[in-house]
Amino acid sequence: MKSIFISFDQAYYDQILHILNYNNVRGFTRWDNVQGRGSKTGEPHYGSHAWPSLNSAIMTVVPDEKVKTLLEELKALDDTSELMGLRAFVWAVEESI
């Protein structure tokens, strides 16, 4: 199993939820009002007067065989806007309860 951590502009929430639902990914944890900035390009997301947008984050654990499809669909969504920002990171899940 793999864990996928997705950090994204809050405006992407509905599209990301659609991607998860379409791929039969039921379980996830979501954090709202996440601040940050991209390592390459894009606008900072600080929730401030100068940089008013914010990010959210989702973490989900999925079978190995779902990772490639999910990353491809998330990448396609990210490609729709350079400034909004979306990143996904995959970690191995060694144990769970």
Image (cartoon, rainbow, N blue to C red):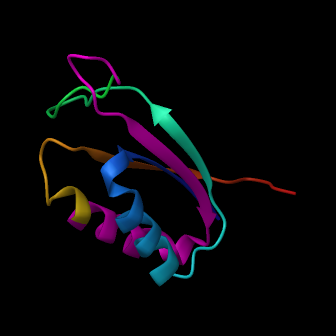
**What residue is rendered at 30% in x and 28% in y?**
45
Q: Measuring from the top left, give residue 40's x and y in whole percent.
A: 17, 31
Q: Residue furthest front?
A: 49
Q: Who is closer to the viewer here, 58 or 48? A: 48
**What residue is rendered at 22% in x and 66% in y?**
76
Q: Measuring from the top left, give residue 63's x and y in whole percent.
A: 61, 72
- Which quadrant: the C terminus? bottom right
Q: Which residues are magenta?
A: 47-76
Q: Residue furthest right?
A: 97
Q: Is residue 15 above or below residue 58?
A: below
Q: Is residue 38 left or right of residue 19?
A: left
Q: Is residue 44 above or below residue 76?
A: above
Q: Who is closer to the viewer here, 9 or 96? A: 9
Q: Is residue 29 left or right of residue 38?
A: right
Q: Measuring from the top left, give residue 34's x and y in whole percent.
A: 46, 32
Q: Measuring from the top left, give residue 88's x and y in whole percent.
A: 39, 50
Q: Is residue 12 magenta?
A: no
Q: Is residue 37 left or right of residue 26?
A: left
Q: Is residue 44 left or right of residue 26?
A: left
